[in-house]
Amino acid sequence: MRKAYTIALVGNPNSGKSSLFNALTGLNQKVGNFPGVTVDKKTGSTHLSNNTTAHVIDLPGTYSLYPKSADEQVTYEVLLNRNNPDRPDMIVVIADAANLKRNLLFCSQIMDLGLPVIIALTMNDIARKKGISIDINGLERLMGVPVVAINPRKNKGITQLKKTITDYTAGRNITSEFIDVKKLTGDWITEVKELCNVESNYAALHIACNYLELPHLNAAQRIRIGALLDEVAFHKAKIQADEVMQRYQRIGTIMQQCVVEVNPLTRTILSERIDKTLLHPLWGNLILLAVLFLLFQSIFWLAAYPMDWVEQGFSVLSGWLDGLMPDGFVKDLLINGVLAGISGVAVFIPQIMILFGFITILEDSGYMARISFLTDRLMRSAGLNGRSVMPLISGMACAVPAIMAARTIQNRKERLITIMVTPLMSCSARLPVYTILIGLVIPEKKFLIFNMQGLVLMGLYLLGFFMALIVSKVMSLVIKMKEKTYFLMELPVYRAPRWKNVGITMIEKAKVFVTDAGKVIMIISILLWALATYGPPAQMDKVTEKYALLKQQNPTQTENLGRAEQMEKLEHSFAGIAGHAIEPAIRPLGYDWKIGIALITSFAAREVFVGTMATLYSVGSEDNDATLREKMRNATRADGTPVYTLATGLSLTIFYVFAMQCMSTLAIVKRETRSWKYPVIQFLYMSAIAYLASLLVYQLFS
């Protein structure tokens, strides 16, 4: 007997499965890994009724029961292996009402496994907007299993779904065979069914198709199945093709009787007309470049005013506190540690929100899928395919989920290469670094009608993308794996973005940036303040005595001497000692010891660079009214020359384009590849490219 009744949620990707899981389990959920693989395992519990609690498992999304990726293989193993500890007592299949025909194929395959099945129909509001009307009762009758319309985002239909599940637990389960498998295969399928102890002929057919890859079969079973398939001259591809044809024939009949679509031909023609332009080899790519151009122009143009307001607000607050509070430890910590760290986070929130807002619009409108289609040829020239584009584009937000998204890539070689090059895409953590450096060294001028700073920002993103392609090509030649791959993608219908969803995403991503990145930046800012304020007592006392004597000798120069004392104390602090230690290695790139400290601290997260600069220039300055950009612009070397020249600024920007400075990314690469070899290689090759490229840029512009 099982300790708990287990329900599995299965469905196509983006069908609403995760939303239903969250609606059912609420806070009673946890994330782990399936045994032996790196695929996420989401489980939770839900109350079906007053006396019934169920264990819910969210299986990875899949389009069919023929696995082609690590995620799909996990779902396959859980559903076919009767001894799998995660095997469910019941399956809830989530079907997208707006794409019902494709979803019913998967539903029918799950039904024929012999387990109790309920169909949860999602996206009903989108279906109505597309002019699709579904007869729920008729669909339930013809499919032979319960069908429940739900909207998990609004918590609609969840109570009815729980009631239907409860009825099944009471024994009112209805199972039926969608197609006659024995008629398709012959009587030999019965022997496979009995040999492997599975519930249905269809489960036995899947075992026959994949008996060599299924880990739960023993040697005797594999030998007997192999011999039996030789006897009957089993042709896997033909059987699978016939099966799919039979399923679509019956699904077509069901769709005719239960689904009414208003002017489907008109919609198809309109979508095709748009695609003739957006997917054109020439115009499509030009439009894509225009879309990216608009995105990066907007990041500077739309965010300029709120960023200035935030920056000026913190400047005024720092000046007010400076005049209000007495000199001492608390004032120094609050202004130069805490407030400097917070301002380094808050000022970039508008740009982060705009970036994620645009990405959400591209996804919601259906254009993101077209980007994959457009770039497939380019990807193939670099040893990848169009499926790699989604992780790479996701890498513009954050490399961690982008690398996890590479699980959907079926080809092992292409998946590994995608993982290895995704961090070269400029993520949102780099955006604050780009922004402050571009603002320092690139004049705010117009090139024709375009903002020069926006053009440079777009160039940095494209530079990372093309370097990813170059590295991909090299790796495709080095990594010896021969495995054919095909890129098939269903292009969604164009639709207007859900503006509420765009707004929610922008707010949520801003919260994540503030809470996740903000916590790291705050901790490092306070720690760095301490390291930049204190140093070896003997050295610090020596500096204090030196300037006390100079102030007595030159009372009219007290203010200038005080500023010089702050700078010299900073150089003799623990942070200054560390910066000077690495300065010989970074001096050829045009960097000073303060930049060296920022390079070290930003290994925790790239955006920490800004917080580090804010702290260092606050500790070393008595002008609390000045903004960080003003302090950096006025920074000079020992010989009086400015630190942030065009050559230094561009060199530092290029370094952050290529450098692997993210511990979280290295950790997720280790997790996904299950080896330290690949993150070490990744760190070394990216650091080498970053150093050499920065050196070249500095020499060219010096």
Image (spheres, helix red, strand yellow):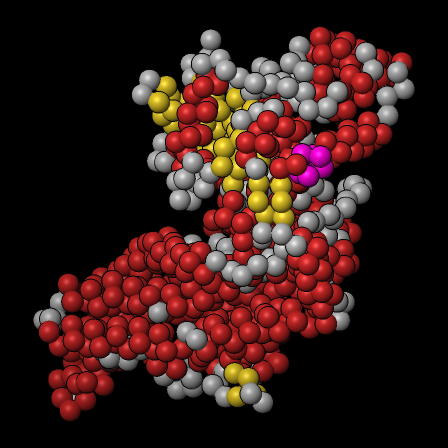
Measured from the top left, where is residue 472 in percent x and y?
A: 70, 55
Residue 381, picture quadrant: bottom right
Q: Foreground residue, 601 or 130?
A: 130
* Residue 431 falls left or right of residue 257: left
Q: Residue at x 53, y 72 (%)?
A: 296
Q: Which residue is drawn at 47% across and 72% down?
A: 299
**Vertically, is 450 above or below 51?**
below
Q: Which residue is drawn at 51% across and 41% down?
A: 122
Residue 539 lies in the magenta-colored region: no
* Residue 601 falls left or right of residue 400: left
**Vertically, is 455 above or below 393?**
below
Q: Which residue is situated farthest in the bottom direction here?
A: 556
Q: Main secondary structure of the magenta part?
A: helix
Measured from the top left, where is residue 534 in percent x and y?
A: 25, 62
Residue 147 visible in image? yes
Q: Foreground residue, 361 or 675?
A: 361
**Vertically, is 258 above or below 287?**
above
Measured from the top left, where is residue 666 in percent x and y?
A: 52, 48
Residue 539 visible in image? no
What segment carries the magenta color? 251-256
- Placement of the C terminus among the 4 image quadrants: bottom right
Q: How many marks?
A: 0
Measured from the top left, where is residue 510 in percent x and y?
A: 38, 59
Q: Residue at x 56, y 48 (%)?
A: 127
Residue 469, picture quadrant: bottom right
Residue 253 lies in the magenta-colored region: yes
